[in-house]
Amino acid sequence: MITMQSSLFRPLLLAGAALGAYAAPALAADAPAAEVAAPTDIVVTARYRSEPLQHVPIAISAVTGATLSAQALHNLQDLSATVPALDFRNGSSNKDRTVFIRGIGTISTSPGVEPSVSTVVDGVVLARPGQATLDVGEVERIEVLQGPQGTLFGKNASAGVINVVTAAPSARFHAYGEGYATTDSEYRIKAGLTGTVAKDLTARIDGLYTHYDGNVINLPTGDKVNGFERYGARGKLQWTPAANLKITAAGDYLQSHDTVPNGVFISASQTAFPTNVTTTNAALASYLAGLGVHLGRDNRTASSSFDSDVRDKNYGAALTGELSLANGATVTSISAWRGWRNHQHQDYDQVAALTSSLYTGEDHGELAAHQFSQELRLTSAKGHLIDYVLGAYYFYAQDDEVYRRDVTKLIGGAATPYEGIAHYGTRGNNYALFGEANINFTSRFRGIAGYRSSWDKLDYYHLRTSSNDPGNTGLPADDVTAIRAFHQSSGSTTARGDTARLGLQFDFARANQAYFTWSRGYKGPAYDVYFNMRSQYVNGVAYPLDEIRLAPETSSSFELGAKGSALNHGITYGVALFSTVFNNYQANYNDTVGGAQVTRLINAGRVGTRGVQVDLGLHPTAGLSAQTSVLLNDAKVLNFNCPTGAPASCLINGQPLPFAPRLKLSENVAWRFAVAAAADLELQSDVEVKSKTQYQLTETPNSVQSGYAIWNASVALIGHDGWQVRALVKNITNTHYSDYLGNGNLAGTVRFVPRDDDRYAGFLVRKDF
């Protein structure tokens, strides 16, 4: 049974009393402001062809670009508040951030492992999750596909897919400008235009700039942190030289500077699992008290000697060709290249004190990554006995990183410096052949069959030198400095894997369907390659514990669902029951060596997720829309493989997976009605409810976030000729929570502070021309 504090439900009851259950205003991308689309009208490309969302036999949540703008949702972290199956792991760098679907995701800063949730932007798969955690810009829609999707989207889609479809060029001239400001000093500007620039040639360009000071004070420096500054642009050219040929060239660039602190202390203590024994670091407690830090789960004061920050540059280009054949089939080619540069500067020790038990550490990391992909596919026409998608895929990813740590210890009253620097990286190649088909036994009953065969080759290199080991012996005299000894290694592995899907789909009434699918997921082999690798020694010979080859991760998933509408779309619904088991689950496990945090990427064993998601929409009259989406999920460790040298606390069978609340609910209601001949008034409110969530695979009690609810609302005046003025309030009940909790690097417990940790108001103005 799920229990939560009664205060968790107050915003839900207030929102329900005020406006009803959940709804989402979904304005068509370039439609006049008065045109509102019901969820049944949303068209998705989850199977590489345009289909109404309610016709696809997959559990999908789709959010339009207009809804994202109206609710001030700017990135995947914001999106996770409105999609119950989606969760987000925060971090001080984009390298540390990732997403989860139904409690499954990959936590690792290593370039040698792929995410379990694939992020796809305009048909281009992103190699690492950190490339996708910034602003999404102007989009047509975002689709969240739940469960294994490897047959069409590839090997790093074993838990699901986030499919981002950005706004496309149009022949009709359209321009817009949007400004957004909040009471706590966040500012955002978006603008763009599209139209015909020459015969058979259309273009589009969109740009954004945003700045936020932050909601955390770093006491030693006196600066406001946990903010950001981001700016970028996306452009598209679309050429139609013939009626059956369309060629689209696209390019984008986004630069970001985030000042996220490397953890904010909520306690000077840590509690062990499974003993529940609590240990307190007296030196840390004394330092924080002297600095004036008021410890607690709502603390928003950092204690670092400098302001940690991260700088990112994300950019890329793609060329897409679509050729329509005489038989109604379509040939699609997508060639894409992307680059990512990341610089992180972090206070490793998280304090500004140097004592015999607290040393100082400063980290610098440089990442340079790029990828190239080529996809070619054939999509048949519909209406035959078999309709299908066939394709071939190639993907190359290269990552090179340099990471340096400088540590100062107080030894015999003297400050003693140490330093370590590591050069490491990976090269990965993936080849695949894939296909998926519908076998139309009748007009209402069909079978589903899909298969993908993948070939992987992964190489890595790693060289670390350390003043802790000046002779490069690999045998450190002292490991407490959080800098390991000299280390050099390299490796290569190859693998071939299979993904598959089988299912049945039956249209039991007009606009209503039931389906059953079985899917096999596959994620390729991996290496854990990062700065602070450790080794064990046998007769003076070093044996790496972390750079061992990880076996591919596989999964088997069953889903039974129904979706459709009734009363002329006055009611829409979707129900999905699911059960998925993952074998050789690739997971990061935190350990402590010599008093310092060490993470190890391992084949953690077998984990499972099972539950039910229900989506219910009510559209009783034009302008009024209400929908509730709720996920009940039991995601847990089934059989954990303790890594070599790990403590007995790694016996976590039966414990919940991190970022997998048992209950997550999203509600929204919008009521739009005319107040003048040329203008409408819209009242909108939304609520997110989330049960308690464990953030660590180590199951430490101090890393559990209690259940909470966040209530938001807005009121807008919308003109029929394309303008709107909207006032909104976020976190109306001023509920404090953390989107990440964990042990401090040296001692204590830290939190990461979300953007909406306290109440604020905003004002949005938009004009479409």
Image (cartoon, rainbow, N blue to C red):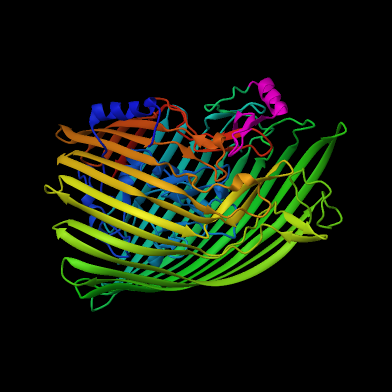
Task: Please state the horizontal and vertical placement of residue 271, each as a whole percent of the image.
Answer: 60, 34
Is 48 above or below relative to 656? below
Residue at position x 76%, y 41% in the image: 407
Q: Which of the image's four quarters has the N terminus?
A: top left
Kindly tell me whether residue 24 is visible in this rendering: no
Task: Please state the horizontal and vertical placement of residue 744, each as a whole percent of the image.
Answer: 64, 37
Nearest the viewer among 136 and 632 is 632
Is 141 above or below relative to 260? below
User: In the image, 734: left or right of 241?
Assistant: right
Please tell me whether residue 611 belongs to the stretch shown in magenta: no
User: In the image, 217: left or right of 393?
Assistant: right
Nearest the viewer among 690 and 275 is 275
User: In the image, 610: left or right of 404?
Assistant: left
Q: Which of the image's four quarters has the C terminus?
A: top left
Kindly tell me whether residue 739 is visible in this rendering: yes
Task: Specify start and end residues of the magenta stretch as a single range.
Answer: 263-292
Task: Please state the horizontal and vertical placement of residue 238, each as a whole percent of the image.
Answer: 35, 64
- Across the whole image, how many numbered discs are drawn on residues? 0
Nearest the viewer among 658 and 533 is 658
Residue at position x 52%, y 49% in the image: 653
Please tell me whether residue 271 belongs to the stretch shown in magenta: yes
Determine which quarter of the picture holds residue 535: bottom right
Task: Please state the horizontal and vertical placement of residue 579, each as a whole percent of the image.
Answer: 37, 55
Is 364 above or below relative to 14? below
